[in-house]
Amino acid sequence: MQTMATILERAARLYGERLAIIDGPWCKNWSEYLERITRAAGVLVALGIRTGDRFGIISHNTFRMAELINAGYWLGAVAVPINYRLAPPEIDYILKDADCRLLAVEDVFLHMLATPELIPYKTKSICLAGTGTATDIPCYETLLDKAEPQPMQASRPDDDAILLYTGGTTGRSKGVRLSHANILANALQIGLAISARESDRFLHIMPMFHSADLFGTVFTLVGGVHVYVSAFTPKNLLQAVHEHRLTVLSLGPTILIRTLQVSDFDQYDCSSIRLIFYGSAPMAVEWINRTMLKFPNAGLQQGYGLTETAPILTTLTPEDHHRAIHSGRYELLRSVGKPVVLVDLRIVDEAGIDQPVGAIGEVVVRGPNVSKGYLGLPEQNAATFRDGWFHTGDLGQLDRDNNLYIMDRMKDMIITGSENVYSSEVEAALYKHPAIHEAAVVGVPDEQWGEAVFAVIVPTPGQTLSKDEVIEHCRKFIGGFKIPRRMAFVSELPKSAM
């Protein structure tokens, strides 16, 4: 049976002399890369990590971080990539919750180990940087030079491969257990959906502590090239596309929109991009058209998924995008498409009864990419993973062609005067105004209606807005009971670390 380790061995065996990794000037072919992974596993063994143990990583996107994650796969240990934007108490919570036996820290984050919460981890940390870093913490590259290559451990497909923590927007962050089989299944599902090929070059620009980065697994399967950029800036992205002739991008809409706004965009050659996969939110038609103009050879493909599904569940194909644009049926672009192969998807009510076409209910799914559950949370697992189905907590509806439309998180639905209002629908209407840069819609207590619709709006730089102007704008797109009558204009929206 295949595991993440066996596909690494396969890549080296089949594609040995072909380029595998690019990180700035650092390049390795598949044979060289696997040799480093086996020695990285030796570093873990020398530091006391055994099969089944978990270890934390705090780092930007780098080949060394990827190497350690892969070394965990090779050894049968479990990497725990940690969001470096979290506060020390939050990192301490994750390290304790996961029972991490080791912590690898990129040199730029070593200062965190001086905080009271993380000082105890200093004696079991290594510095994830080059040999020139001056530190009293053992340096990864120095340890790697001395390490003994390790043989592949015989993991089972259902064994944990990686532990990813959710954003914690609805409470304590949860550790999602993803198995070798989960990750491989989704890699195959993505591969079929995007027609992955050995000539592909993929950019790891979404943070590697996020499940979105698992999208890149498919390019190990086909022997493509992994390119790493430590942190997103629009120019970093465009420079990587231009310099490395990238073919596939997987981005959040905000990243894509910011990149399209670069003043000297046309100085970069983007003709090599054949596919831009975007997710986490739909994009306005205007931005889709602009993307097609700026990336003339690229198809656009939207996806929906969660950390618990490793991550992709559905996709709206490039053909769907073209059909919607050329037919004027723009409503389809709000859809996240149809389920990928081997995923079953239903819309159910609170009693678990299937809902008809067009009715709104909870999205529940099953498939080989669905996690076995959360670490150490039996009650949460019982509530979320029921009767073979994963209850996403998202509200959605299906159209007659079985395209899925995500309406809201169940906890975020607003009930005003006994009417259900979905924040995403109101936000979509707000975003149609050219002077609205960002918007978030929430319910607030109201004596008359129970809840009132409240909008927090960030105007486009240089633009001004009034409450009356926003209300009149919304009348064109949504019913009166959905229109926010209370609102605040702010300079930016608060965001979680994720």
Image (tube, grey):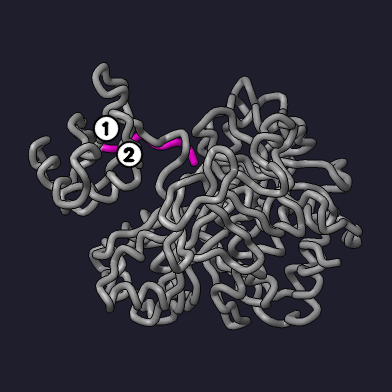
Q: Amino acid at mark 2?
A: Val
State which region is magenta: 492-498
Going by the numbered disc 1, the residue's amino acid type is Val
**Relative to 233, is 85 on the left or the right?**
right
Residue sitting at 24 percent across and 64 percent down?
Answer: 286
Task: Judge whether residue 139 can be spotted in this image.
Answer: no
Residue 211 horizontal/vertical position (percent): 59, 52
Q: Position of residue 425 (x, y in %)?
A: 31, 47
Q: Main secondary structure of the magenta part?
A: loop
**Residue sitting at x 67%, y 38%:** 175
- Where is mark 2, residue-wise? 421
Q: Residue 367 got which mark?
A: none
Please tell me whether mark 1 sits on a helix, a strand or a loop.
strand
Nearest the eye: 327 or 455: 327
Q: Is residue 41 above or below residue 299?
A: above
Badge 1 density bin: few <14, some 14–19, many ≥20, Cα 10 Å: many
The disc placed on residue 453 is 1
Q: Secondary structure at mark 2?
A: strand
Residue in the picture at 71% in, 35% down = 382
Give the mark nearer the N terminus: 1 vs 2.
2
Residue 100 horizontal side relative to residue 25, left or right? right
Question: How far apart in space, not on screen, are marks 1 and 2 (Cα)?
Answer: 8 Å
Q: Position of residue 123 (x, y in %)?
A: 76, 30
Say if mark 1 contacts mark 2, CB within 8 Å. yes
Q: Residue at x 35, y 46 (%)?
A: 424
| Horizontal relation, residue 404 to residue 82: left or right | left
Residue 496 on the magenta span = yes
